[in-house]
């Protein structure tokens, strides 16, 4: 499956940045991190295994949830730090394959200190896409580096029927969002997820090649073929939460340690905690066209660091296995 560029020249170039549909997400002052918070986060990684009741730390999701039908409202929540070359594919997929059966609000958290992403978002803000509204949210780098902070703010502020928490390397293929709209009709599950995702092989040369394309500021076709993979739970980029649940409990809103800033991008262990707090691994749905670009080099991590090199080797080994 590939995303094409047909029809790009005919797109009307009209600003459509969502500044009125809902109040902007306002970032509170960054919480300083501490050794106690680090210990607390480690504790919740262990607690999320299920050995400790989640209700000791947070209220249950609301049992009564609206069974929305008709033309649903979906909010897609993504983050980008030094990943403009991947975010371009995600946003391009929404332009090339706009939803026909639902309204989609695309919220992207980013930092002004990442000029490539800022320029990319300005480019897409000029594109009018039927059924899609752009919503760019600036965070201080220290808050952007812990993805849970932005996700929590978006969850508490959303007006949507459903919220898709995802990553900027995920692409919405043709028919993906319309199929999702059909599957979500009348559902009240706290959390659902695509039971199959289509992934590229691990791209060894993606950063140089994809970054070069991102500098051109044009719509992007996908770089490689995809292979289907079965998904066993609602992992970080595949978490689709009910809007009533999101407004009530946020994204790990009860865990103060997840609200502390960070000096570099932190691995998202809170995704597991989130599912534990909701009391579910999610309900699988048959949603076609969910595509993900897998890549070795993690631009969000510290360049040249030992951990970045170790992660690359681990990812290569897993991909060969």
Image (cartoon, helix red, strand yellow):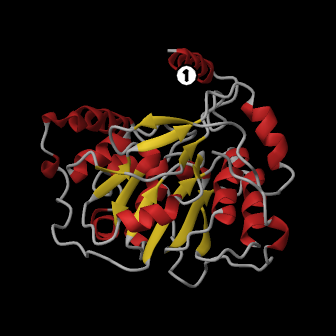
Residue 252 in view, yes or no: no
Residue toward you, 248 or 254: 248
The image shows residue 1 at horizontal and vertical percentages of 63, 45
Check disc 1 and report the residue beneath it: 315
Q: Is residue 291 above or below residue 249?
A: above
Q: Is residue 3 above or below residue 34?
A: below
Residue toward you, 200 or 60: 200
Q: Is residue 114 above or below residue 209?
A: below
The secondary structure type at the circle numbered 1 is helix
Q: Residue at x 27, y 38 (%)?
A: 44
Q: Residue at x 79, y 41 (%)?
A: 211
The image shows residue 144 at horizontal and vertical percentages of 56, 51
The image shows residue 289 at horizontal and vertical percentages of 53, 51
The image shows residue 77 at horizontal and vertical percentages of 51, 59
Q: Residue at x 77, y 73 (%)?
A: 126
Residue toward you, 258 or 106: 106
């Amino acid at each position: 499956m590939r995303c094409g560029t047909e029809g790009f020249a005919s797109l009307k170039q009209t600003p459509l940045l969502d500044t009125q549909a809902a109040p902007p997400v306002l970032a509170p002052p960054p919480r300083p991190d501490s050794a106690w918070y680090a210990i607390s986060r480690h504790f919740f990684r262990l607690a999320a295994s299920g050995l400790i009741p989640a209700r000791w730390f947070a209220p249950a999701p609301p049992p009564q949830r609206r069974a929305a039908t008709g033309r649903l409202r979906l909010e897609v929540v993504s983050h980008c730090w030094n990943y403009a070359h991947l975010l371009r594919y995600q946003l391009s997929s929404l332009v090339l394959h706009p939803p026909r059966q639902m309204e989609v609000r695309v919220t992207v958290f980013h930092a002004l200190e990442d000029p490539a992403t800022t320029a990319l978002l300005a480019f897409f803000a000029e594109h009018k896409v039927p059924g899609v509204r752009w919503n760019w949210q600036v965070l201080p780098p220290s808050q952007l580096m812990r993805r849970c902070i932005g996700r929590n703010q978006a969850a508490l502020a959303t007006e949507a029927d459903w919220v898709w928490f995802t990553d900027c390397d995920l692409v919405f293929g043709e028919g993906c969002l319309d199929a999702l709209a059909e599957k979500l009709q009348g559902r009240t599950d706290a959390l659902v997820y695509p039971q199959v995702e289509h992934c590229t092989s691990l791209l060894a040369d993606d950063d140089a090649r994809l970054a070069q394309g991102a500098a051109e500021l044009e719509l992007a076709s996908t770089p490689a073929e995809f292979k289907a993979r079965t998904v066993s739970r609602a992992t970080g980029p595949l978490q689709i939460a009910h809007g009533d649940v999101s407004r009530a409990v946020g994204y790990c809103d009860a865990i103060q340690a997840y609200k502390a800033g960070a000096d570099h991008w932190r691995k998202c262990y809170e995704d597991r905690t989130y599912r534990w707090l909701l009391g579910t691994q999610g309900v699988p749905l048959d949603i076609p066209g969910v595509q993900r670009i897998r890549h070795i080099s993690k631009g969000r991590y510290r360049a040249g660091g030992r951990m970045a090199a170790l992660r690359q080797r681990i990812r290569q080994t897993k991909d060969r296995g």
